[in-house]
Amino acid sequence: MKKIIFTEKAPAPIGPYNQAVAFGNTLFTSGQIAINPQTDELVLEDIETETRQVMENMKAVLEEAGMTFENVIKTSIFIMDMNNFAKINGVYGSYFDEKTAPARETVQVAGLPKGVNVEISMIAMK
């Protein structure tokens, strides 16, 4: 049976989806973008700050599900400009232990919601 995960510490969905869905011991998150959940404003000062907001939003969703980044087994990163990869990767990497980091793909895309530069989704297991 699936369980809907929702926290006010991450941006509310802006469409017909949920922040995350748990099924058994597996958590499937929706993509997070850099919306500050307290202000509902985009955080786009620079790519590092934007990526940090995305990761903090994801952290809140994971915590609501009783998990941490240690539980993450797979991530998908969507970026507008592959030239930002190193900066995004630097912030992203600071949330994981490199020895136990999840599997991942990083894909450059033609567009993302609200004109953001990065979106990240995750799969985690307890």
Image (cartoon, rainbow, N blue to C red):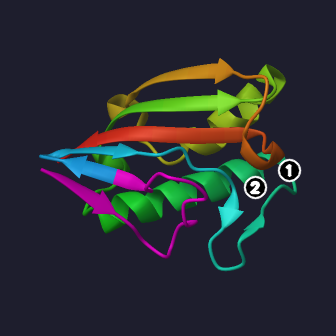
Left or right placement of residue 87 versus residue 27 in this view: right
Q: Residue at x 72, y 28 (%)?
A: 86
Residue occupying the far bottom of the picture: 38
Q: Amino acid at mark 2?
A: Thr
Q: Which residue is mark 2?
A: 49
Q: Amino acid at mark 1?
A: Asp
Name the secondary structure under disc 2: helix
x and y percentages locating residue 90 in the rendered image? 65, 38
The kind of secondary structure the magenta stretch mainly shows is loop
Residue 84 at x, y = what percent?
79, 30
Residue under the image location 61 percent in, 53 percent down: 54
Residue behind mark 1: 46
Image vertical order of residue 72 relative to residue 54, above or below:
above
Identify the element where label 1 is drawn: loop
Mark 1 and mark 2: Cα distance apart in space? 5 Å
- What residue occupies the far right of the structure in this picture? 45
The residue furthest front is: 16
The percent coordinates of residue 67 (x first, y second) are 28, 57
**Residue 13 is covered by the magenta coloring:** yes
Q: Are marks 1 and 2 in contact (CB under 8 Å)?
A: yes
Q: Magenta span covers which residues?
A: 1-20
Q: Residue at x 64, y 20 (%)?
A: 107
Q: Nearer the viewer, residue 14 or 10?
A: 14
Does 64 sit left or right of 104 as displayed?
Answer: left
